[in-house]
Image: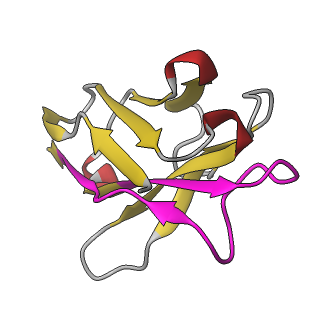
């Protein structure tokens, strides 16, 4: 059975930091393109950062570039999102996504495995 599990959300003041973690089971971790998506109330789910299977290549959306850092440790089957200089507009449910994919950086299209989501709230 495939599972994708996030942890680390919470409430933080603007300017603060949070660290999200994601792990998987039932998948070969170093076969996976992985990413973090978020969905704010009334908005569509959007990709904010992705990392390819080896960790060498990353993508950041303009809204988080320079503030968020994605990393992975394949030996520990761990994906990390370090979020610094948080803003109230970063408030959303954050989802970890994984897909068996070695050609692209981001999970996209069909056959994406999703975590259950973790709430991040940034107060002003």
The picture places residue 21, in percent across and down from the top left corner, at 37, 32
Quarter in which the N terminus is drawn: bottom left
Camera-side residue: 106 or 24?
Answer: 24
Camera-side residue: 21 or 121?
Answer: 21
User: What residue lies at 49% left-to-right and 47% top-to-bottom?
Assistant: 26
Q: How is the image coloured?
A: secondary structure
Residue 105 sits inside the magenta stretch: yes
Q: Is residue 59 visible to the viewer in this orientation of the structure?
A: no
Residue 36 sits inside the magenta stretch: no
Based on the displayed image, in which of its 4 quarters is residue 109 positioned? bottom right
Residue projecting furthest to the front: 1
The picture places residue 115, in percent across and down from the top left corner, at 36, 56
User: What residue lies at 62% left-to-right and 72% top-to-bottom?
Assistant: 111
Magenta segment range? 95-121
Based on the displayed image, in which of its 4 quarters is residue 74 positioned? top right
Residue projecting furthest to the right: 103
Q: Is residue 75 visible to the viewer in this orientation of the structure?
A: yes
The picture places residue 107, in percent across and down from the top left corner, at 66, 59
Quarter in which the C terminus is drawn: top left
The picture places residue 60, in percent across and down from the top left corner, at 64, 45
Report whether 77 appears left or right of 93: right
User: What residue lies at 28% left-to-right and 59% top-to-bottom?
Assistant: 116
Count of labels shown? Answer: 0
User: What residue lies at 55% left-to-right and 60% top-to-bottom?
Assistant: 47
Residue 11 sits above or below residue 16 on the image: below
């Amino acid at each position: 059975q495939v599972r994708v599990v996030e942890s680390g959300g919470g409430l933080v003041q603007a300017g603060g930091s949070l660290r999200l973690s994601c792990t998987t089971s039932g998948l070969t971790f170093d076969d996976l393109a992985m990413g973090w998506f978020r969905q704010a109330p009334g908005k569509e789910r959007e990709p904010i950062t992705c990392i390819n299977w080896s960790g060498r290549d990353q993508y950041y959306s303009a809204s988080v570039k320079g503030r968020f850092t994605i990393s992975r440790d394949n030996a520990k089957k761990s994906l990390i999102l370090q979020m610094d200089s948080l803003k109230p507009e970063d408030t959303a449910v954050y989802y970890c996504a994984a897909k068996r994919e070695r050609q692209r950086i981001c999970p996209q299209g069909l056959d994406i495995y999703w975590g259950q989501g973790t709430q991040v709230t940034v107060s002003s």
